[in-house]
Image (cartoon, rainbow, N blue to C red):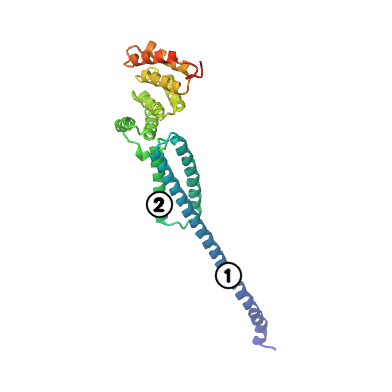
């Protein structure tokens, strides 16, 4: 056919042929998008379910930790340490799930923060070391020292060590720095962690030999050495106190303790 309509027919025909292909292609894209959305929703639901399961497991662990604390058994420290490790693992898993699950609600986020707060409280109640946030450390040196001495006086061991470490780090040349370091070692000794106490006391002997906490340090070092059955070292610490700090109020106690140490034998000491 001649004329303008004849020239248009091939173009129109090709358009009509291409239209079903276009519709099919578009329909396929929509179907794929719907499938992707469904898959993403399933993944999100799965993540939220996993997150909830981990939170329940953590709550059970917190309850178990509280029961251990109430029992006050001889192996309390070991049990709490095992629970703490378990909780730390779960906290890591929860953090990963929270990062993947972008659809977590504000309520869930607040619940996770509450669990973390309870975890820290249980750990501190057990005397385990928990790092302090900057907002938990007093800004002024005077307020910091007052908070530290109060915590030490009422035997809040974990909090005492955290405050003391922060004090020594912030004010290493301060007149109270050696006393702060002493509180770290003393708190460990009160908890029956003699080896940890000795490590902290050694820092005083090395760094604050001329400080006013050295006599208390030597006396407590002797107690810690006895707990690890190192009687000769205990005697050495007491002798150093008596020789170099004759005006210390601890001299009478040190003399009495030294006499006891000299009487100990192989049944009480690994170095005799």
Residue for point 43% across, 49% down: 59
Q: Look at the picture and state if 247 lies above or below 145.
A: above
Furthest-right residue in this view: 1
Which residue, as the protein is rendered here, is positioned at the far front? Answer: 267
Closest to the camera, between mark 1 and mark 2, is: 2
* Spot occupied by residue 205 in the image (x, y as percentages of width and height): 42, 19
Q: Is residue 177 left or right of residue 23?
A: left
In this view, 161 is above or below 234: below
Q: Picture coordinates of residue 75 (x, y %)?
A: 45, 34
Q: Position of residue 158 (x, y in %)?
A: 39, 34
Residue on which the image places disc 1:
31
Find residue 111 and name its label: 2
Viewer can see residue 192: yes
Mark toward the start of the polypeptide (1 vs 2): 1
**Picture residue at 58% right of the left edge, 67% below the top:** 32
Query: Residue at point 47% right, 46% down?
Result: 91
Relative vertical location of residue 58 with respect to residue 255 in this rendering, above or below: below
Left or right: 82 as drawn, with respect to 124: right
């Amino acid at each position: 056919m001649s004329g303008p309509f004849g020239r248009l027919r091939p173009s129109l025909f090709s358009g009509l042929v291409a239209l079903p292909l276009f519709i099919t292609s578009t329909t396929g894209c929509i179907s794929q998008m719907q499938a992707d959305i469904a898959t993403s929703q399933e993944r999100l639901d799965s993540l939220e379910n996993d997150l909830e399961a981990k939170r329940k497991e953590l709550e059970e662990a917190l309850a178990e930790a509280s029961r251990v604390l109430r029992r006050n058994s001889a192996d309390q420290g070991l049990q709490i340490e095992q629970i703490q490790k378990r909780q730390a693992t779960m906290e890591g898993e929860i953090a990963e799930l929270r990062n993947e699950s972008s659809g977590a609600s504000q309520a869930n986020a607040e619940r996770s923060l509450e669990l973390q707060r309870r975890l820290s409280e249980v750990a501190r109640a057990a005397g385990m070391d928990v790092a302090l946030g900057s907002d938990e450390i007093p800004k002024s040196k005077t307020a910091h020292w007052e908070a530290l001495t109060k915590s030490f006086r009422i035997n809040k061991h974990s909090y005492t060590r955290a405050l003391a470490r922060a004090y020594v780090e912030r004010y290493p040349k301060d007149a109270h720095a050696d006393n702060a370091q002493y509180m770290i070692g003393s708190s460990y000794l009160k908890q029956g962690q003699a080896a940890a106490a000795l490590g902290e006391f050694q820092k005083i002997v090395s760094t604050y030999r001329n400080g006013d906490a050295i006599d208390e340090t030597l006396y407590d070092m002797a107690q810690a050495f006895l707990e690890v059955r190192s009687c000769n070292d205990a005697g050495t610490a007491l002798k150093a106190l008596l020789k170099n700090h004759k005006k210390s109020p601890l001299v009478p106690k040190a003399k009495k303790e030294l006499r006891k140490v000299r009487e100990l034998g192989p049944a009480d000491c690994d170095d005799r």
